[in-house]
């Protein structure tokens, strides 16, 4: 690292510390309090299980919750790249997660939709293609869960 870029880095670090920068998912007591009071709807299949697992990493399973997170997950698979020999070599997965955060009385606190996409390769054996599809689904669930967590943490700051 050159001296010039070190100076930039140290200057940026100084200003970030000086302005009270703190990570959104970090040590904020409001965010922690909200995260420990959310109960996530039970999953119905393997893909939803991955989504709930990623959400509960932050939410921490709690039976006496103040809020309920309900969701509807839709995944659409589209053909991507077709080779010159007319074989499919890539698929795209488009995910849409409609979710709502409600309180104990049924009042809606937050409603939103998280959307993202990912892709996987279909070259190789059928087993390798199926494994690549599962990996892509898992990546998509991580992305969608992060979008939900970010939106809820922003809500906790208000």
Image (tube, grey):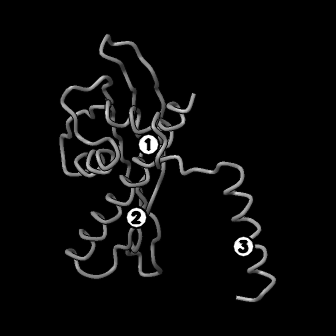
Q: Distance between the residues labelled 3 and 2?
A: 40 Å
The residue drawn where x is 32% and y is 41% is 59
Q: Position of residue 78 (x, y in %)?
A: 41, 56
The residue drawn where x is 39% and y is 26% is 101
Query: Quick one: SS at disc 1?
Result: helix
Are there few (<14), some (14-19), or many (20+) residues within 10 Å of tag 1? some
Which of the two residues, 119 or 158, is positioned nearer the viewer here? 158
Residue under label 1, please give it. 149
Which of the two residues, 104 or 128, is positioned nearer the viewer here? 104
Residue under label 3, please give it. 9
Q: Position of residue 116 (x, y in %)?
A: 48, 50
Residue under label 2, please give it. 91
Q: Do the residues labelled 1 and 2 touch (CB within 8 Å)?
A: no
Q: Do the residues labelled 1 and 3 touch (CB within 8 Å)?
A: no
In this rendering, is residue 63 above or below 129? above
In this rendering, is residue 110 above or below 21? above
Q: Are marks 3 and 2 in contact (CB under 8 Å)?
A: no
For marks 1 and 3, the one nearer the N-term is 3
């Amino acid at each position: 690292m050159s001296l010039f870029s070190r100076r930039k880095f140290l200057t940026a670090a100084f200003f970030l510390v000086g302005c009270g920068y703190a990570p959104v998912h970090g040590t904020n007591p409001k965010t922690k309090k909200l995260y420990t009071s959310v109960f996530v709807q039970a999953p119905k299949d393997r893909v939803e299980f991955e989504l709930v697992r990623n959400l509960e990493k932050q939410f921490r399973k709690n039976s006496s919750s103040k809020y309920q997170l309900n969701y509807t997950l839709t995944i659409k698979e589209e053909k991507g790249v077709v080779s010159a020999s007319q074989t499919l070599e890539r698929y795209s997965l488009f995910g849409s997660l409609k979710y709502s955060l409600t309180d104990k009385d049924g009042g809606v606190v937050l409603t939103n939709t998280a959307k993202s996409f990912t892709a996987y390769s279909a070259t190789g054996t059928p087993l390798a293609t199926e494994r690549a599809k599962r990996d892509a689904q898992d990546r998509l669930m991580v992305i969608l869960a992060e979008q939900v967590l970010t939106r809820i943490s922003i809500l906790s700051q208000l």
